[in-house]
Amino acid sequence: MTAPIPMTNVERSSLRSFVAAGFQALGLTAEDAGIFADALVFSELRFHPGQGQGVMRLRRYQQRIGSGEVNPRAGWSVVKEGPALALVDAHNGIGTVAAAKAMRLAIKKAKEGGIGTVIVRNSTHYGSSAVHACQALDHGCIGIAYTNAGPEMAPWGGREGAVGTNPWSIAAPTDMGFPAVLDIAITTAGKGMMNWYLREGKKMPLDWALTPEGLETDDPGAALKGALLGIGGHKGYGLAFMTDVLTGVLSGGGYGLTPYADPKKLDVSHSFTAIDIAWFMEPGEFERRMGDFAQMTKSRALRPGFDEILIPGEQEARRVARKSENGVPIDNVVLADLIELGRELGLPNRLDVLGPYEGGVL
């Protein structure tokens, strides 16, 4: 039996301050560093650490900024704009920051005309899709966010990557104490989870990835050298392909084999939509209807081996509550690297370490 990867609880506000200070030291403005830090702490709480969307990104961005892959002061410009639409150029800047500002603009348009869509080109990795979709919730809107990515997924029938994980998120408010939030990659899993399984010494499901020879495998080490598989077989490939159409192809940005091909221009494209609920009905009535819909779903008979039915986002809401009880649990390897990075950057902020994480299931 494999042992769980050890983790340590870190006080939440100190973690956020440390990460924000780190990004400022790397050249981001105070505002942009705060946006990025908030997004990474959100992801650290909401997602499994093996998904790699949390504070470990600070080190990755030190490398990307240092090598010139990403411009921390790139700015953000509107190329073309209409009442409900905008096309934005991120100038190879911080994708998470560009995405937050794009969704802010989409929300503004939605509050003025019922719906707003902003497409971003010439961007970089934007982190978790849920960060951006959930931004709309505070403004009485449904949020939709999706992006293309580097070509890690094999097309149906192929064995080499052609399209990205191309993740989507849709967030809608409910009266249940947490929002309904779909946040999925179009692949069955990402390489972050394969690395996690490799560290734990576990085999992985056969539908996650292929070996370089095109064979299904349960060996995460072999899978890391091959291409990822799409959800639902050919259907996932089709969704990923069309996500590239709605982002890179439509925006005039990168698509298919282009994103991440040039280390000096990562060429990632995103799309953000906000829908104003009040255009359709009173927001409280929408939330009531969502709660009713959720209860209809959760009341259905269970399959053998299942204890309950969850709606999208419910597991993540429980994870946030569980993780928040005693601080934010951080992988010990990541924590040690953050502390070292703080020394390298000369950060005055210190991480307030609370003790080992003993919360069980992540």
Image (cartoon, rainbow, N blue to C red):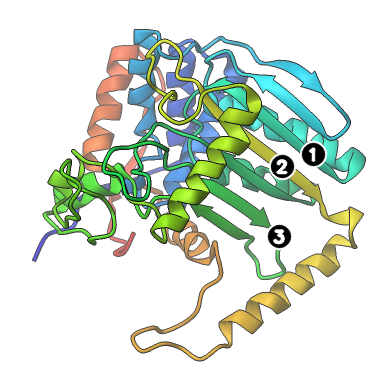
Give amino acid for label 1: Gly
Q: Judge whether 188 appears above or below 76 on screen.
A: below
| Residue positioned 36% across, 46% down in the render | 51
Image-based side of 240 in relation to 295, left or right? left
The residue sitting at 64% across, 81% down in the picture is 295
Residue 49 coordinates in the image, percent (x, y): 34, 47
Q: Earlier in the sequence, mark 3 or mark 2?
A: 3
Mark 2 closeness class: few <14, some 14–19, many ≥20 residues within 10 Å: many
**Vertical relation: 196 (above or below) 305:** above
Q: Position of residue 300 (x, y in %)?
A: 55, 88
Is residue 185 something one can see in this rendering?
A: no
Residue wearing tag 2: 273
Cβ–Cβ below 8 Å for labels 2 and 1?
Answer: yes
- Left or right, 48 with respect to 24, comes to left
Q: Label 2's element?
A: strand
Rendering quarter of residue 353: top left
**Front position among marks 3 and 2:** 2
Is 57 situated above or below 123?
A: below
Q: Which of the two discs, 1 and 3, labels the residue nearer the N terminus?
A: 1
For residue 173, the mark is 3
* Mark 3 neighbour density, 10 Å: few (under 14) some (14–19) many (20 or more): many
Give me the C-alpha separation between circle 3 and circle 2. 15 Å
| N-terminal-most mark, 2 or 1 | 1
Q: Mark 1 and mark 3: span between their CA atoms?
A: 18 Å
Q: Nearer the viewer, residue 118 or 334?
A: 118
Q: Which mark is residue 95?
A: none
What is the spatial separation of the Cα atoms under label 2 and label 1, in whole angstroms? 6 Å
For marks 1 and 3, give the one nearer the viewer. Answer: 1
Q: Secondary structure at mark 3?
A: loop
Residue bearing mark 1: 116
| Mark 1: secondary structure | strand
| Tag 3: amino acid | Pro
